[in-house]
Amino acid sequence: MSGNGSRGRRARYGVWQGGADPLAPPYDVRAAVDRLGEEVLAGGSLPDALRDLLRRRGTDANGERGQGLDDLFERARRMRRDALRRGRLDGTVTRAQALLDRAVAAEREALAGRDDDDARFAEAQLDTLPRSTARAVEELADYEWTSDEARADYQRILDELRDEVLQQRFQGMKDALNGADPGKNPEAAQRMGEMLQDLNDLLGKHARGEDTDDAFAEFMDRHGDFFPDAPQDVDELIDQLARQAASAERLMRSLSSAQRDELAQLMQQALAGTGLAEQMGALTDNLRSLRPDLRWDRGERSQGDQPMGYGEATAALGEVAELDDLLEQLGQEHPGATLDDVDVDAVERQLGRRAADDVRRLRDLEAELRRQGWLQRAAGGGELTLSPKALRRLGSTALKVVFGQLSGGARGQHDTRSAGAAGEATGASRAWEFGDEQPLDVVRTVSNAVQRSHAAGAGRVDLDVSDFEVIETERRAGAAVALLVDLSFSMVSEGRWGPMKQTALALSHLVATQFPQDALQIIGFGRYAMRLTQGELAAVEPDFVQGTNLQHALQLAQRHLRRHPDGDPVVLVVTDGEPTAHLADDGEAVFAWPPQPETVRATVREVDALTRFGATLNLFMLGEDPGLQRFVDAVARRSGGRVLTPSAQDLGRYVVQDYLRARQGRRAAG
């Protein structure tokens, strides 16, 4: 070791200085959760917030900018447009027409140099040719050409089209046939026909649900040279052939009716005599039934000037079809959509390696949000929702915002990690019993262990269950709190939806962490009222149906208070409109504007019932509606409660302060 100079070497460790950290993950999960929380607290829905997170251009953990779904979507949309601008899709028909015109012109020139009846008869035949290219080609099938040049041009119409059709449907066909033309070589046509027959038999077995592993292996042994991409199983083979067949069908649908008929007849003539037309038709039918989800019947309008041949046109339409699939996947508009739906291989083929890496980065972020427990799938495989873990973080964030608004700062520590149901310590302790939640009296517990060990003559101190003592605490009376929040559309239109959500989540988190002995129920009300969990509150959308049914909300609040008779009853109402709906005897909501006396009376009856129950009823009035002001003033006088008029931005501070003030008042009174 000393000979090579390694003695005395020291390994040094420090912060990575060579640029981006190579070991850092390509995403910041907590930052992503906070961004989702910001959107939700601002009044947005979680699906929209998650979609926006994945759509916007993001920064990874190394600070590098990446493409969001919107960037990729826009690139795919531009590429689709460019694919349709490459040329006219009717190039095969126009090419056949051009070759036919050239052949006829060359033949007329050759006939003009002859002075015999046969020449004149041939000219008459050319004069009476149909205007349809396909029908003219058909009528010239048995024509005796005088010009070798004309004969070659006419034959080129059929040969080129046949080659393009077969090459498009079976890439590598020319290599498999060693350059032989099935239209001119009976052996090549026979081999092609045998392959098609075996292929249709294989697809038929697959369609019937039979085991095709051995049949596929045998098929590839016999005909694998027709498929240079070497598909690994029947499904991969079907996918490849179906995409090519669907592109050919889309080309037909993209042409006018006359052009479609022309091309179909030309193709029929090009394949005539080979025995392949029937097998090709059967293959298309089989593929269509096995992959019905492909865009078989969709036509496109090209915008280019130069005509494209059959193969070029179908390739362009195949690219358009794949880009259409990508646009649908990147759009993420269908219910339950996730980034797992995105075909990353197709992204790489069409948009490049970097784009595929960006999709993988976004997919990893979405998966990591689920893996770490920030998001969870709704029951029944529905949309992603915030998990309890994420809701706790969201509530904590909301509470920090609210406490940050409290004038002079909030007294005491508001971010405790543990909170029990016990009250103040009495100074006494007692032996621990199973199920006790009181704090452990460490001094008495250790003292008991020392005394017991000394009495037993033990050389060391061991803790035993009998040593444990807990601190006795006075029983603290809890509160039964109902927070009623207006879900009407006016809360959105006036910019109050986000502050309302933030307030409710902050209060919910405060109760759960600081006052778990209190029972909080959040109740939202529009035309009807409903109880809301934290998760439901985060995901709730505004009620676009007219109606502010405070009566129903007060009914649900009273039921909540009666379920907790030992708690001090508190009702907090956040609203920006006077009651315009109430429940009729049959349970259906009755809406009227302006508010009718029946609605007001029904609401006041619920206020009186809560007052008799002993509930404190405080109202937080948003806005300056005169009708609402008259109503809340009357309710406050009737119930002995208070009316507070915060701005939307101050709502959280008002509600939390009022709740804390009420608790302090009850404790002082005790």
Image: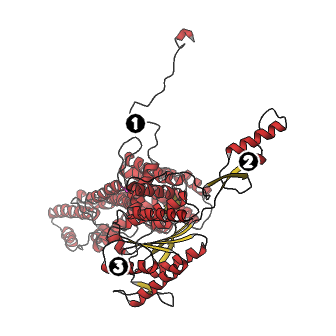
Structural crowding at the residue carrying mark 3, measured as other residues with C-alpha within 10 Å and reported as few (<14), some (14–19) or many (≥20) = some
Q: Measured from the top left, where is residue 480 in percent x and y?
A: 55, 69
Q: CA distance from mark 2 to mark 1?
A: 53 Å
- Give the mark nearer the N terminus: 3 vs 1: 1
Secondary structure mostly seen in magenta is loop
Q: Callout 3, which amino acid? A: Leu
Outermost front residue:
669
Q: Measured from the top left, where is residue 250 in percent x and y?
A: 36, 66
Region rendered in magenta: 54-60
Looking at the picture, tell me which residue is in the foreground, 236 or 138. Answer: 236
Q: Measured from the top left, where is residue 395 in percent x and y?
A: 47, 58
- Give the mark nearer the N terminus: 2 vs 1: 1
Q: Quadrant of residue 130?
A: bottom left
Q: Which residue is mark 3?
A: 628
Q: Which residue is mark 1?
A: 20
Looking at the picture, tell me which residue is in the foreground, 90 or 580. Answer: 580
Q: Callout 1, which amino acid? A: Ala
Q: Which residue is mark 2?
A: 468
Identify the residue shown where x is 30% and y is 79%: 626
Q: CA distance from mark 2 to mark 3?
A: 58 Å
Q: Callout 2, which amino acid? A: Phe
Structural crowding at the residue carrying mark 1, measured as other residues with C-alpha within 10 Å and reported as few (<14), some (14–19) or many (≥20) = few
Identify the residue shown where x is 46% and y is 57%: 394
